[in-house]
Image: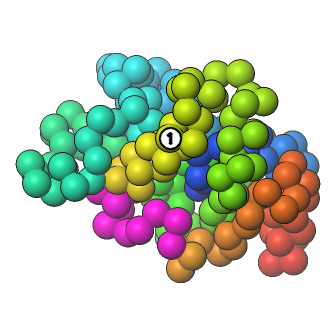
Amino acid sequence: MDNFVVTISREYGSGGHDIGKQLAELLQIPFYDKEIVELTARKHPIDAQRLSEMEEDSKLPFSLIQAFGPLSESDEQLFILQSQTILELAQSSCVIVGRCADFVLRNHPKRFSFFLYSGMKQRVEHMKRKPGLYKASDPMQQAIRMDKRRAAYYKYYTGQEWGQPANYHLCVDTGMLGPRTAELLKTFIELKK
């Protein structure tokens, strides 16, 4: 298959990172998630920590962004630089998790965009099994809070609704197949050859 790119958006705790990594291994192509932050920081004189915080640790829910205006110009610039890194990476086949990559690459002729979700019970169980993912006393509240942040970030930078099926080629409940979800995604890609 010619150059293609896979983007994965995911609910917090749904296993999207692991599934994306496994899919990249199955397809024998590079995998990028937080590495995008590091690559962007290496190319530009920016604060890698701030870039990382933009999506995962933003303290502003979208309702506050609407009420008080846009984020600082520096956040806008960081998003643009990160988007440039994503566009450069997509010149070769790869799997990219998060960072609005489905939107940034919306005009890529061979893009496969997936949204991964799961029931809260499965998400909490997954979080408890993953060191570093479970950071709060109440994992369900942590998942809800992170999903709100991701939705606000996505809405702010894309103008679209995060998790809306029309924005993706396929939405999958990872609670049904767990890690085998990667095999399903690989089959979907192969059927589109």
Residue 166's place in the image compared with 129, above or below, is below
x, y percent for residue 134: 62, 28
Could you tell whether 96 is left or right of 153 in the image?
A: right
Q: Could you tell me which residue is drawn at 46 percent across and 21 percent down?
A: 42
x, y percent for residue 157: 32, 55
Indicate the amino acid at tag 1.
Answer: Gln
x, y percent for residue 184: 87, 65
Disc 1 target residue? 141
Magenta residues (range): 154-164
Q: Residue furthest front?
A: 138
Q: Is residue 156 magenta?
A: yes
Taking the image as drawn, is residue 138 in sight?
A: yes
Could you tell whether 72 is left or right of 120 in the image?
A: left
Q: Residues within 10 Å of mark 1 (few under 14, many from 20)?
A: few
Could you tell whether 68 is left or right of 133 in the image?
A: left
- Choose between 148 and 167: the one closer to the eye: 148
Q: Could you tell me which residue is drawn at 71 percent across and 21 percent down?
A: 131
Q: Secondary structure at mark 1?
A: helix
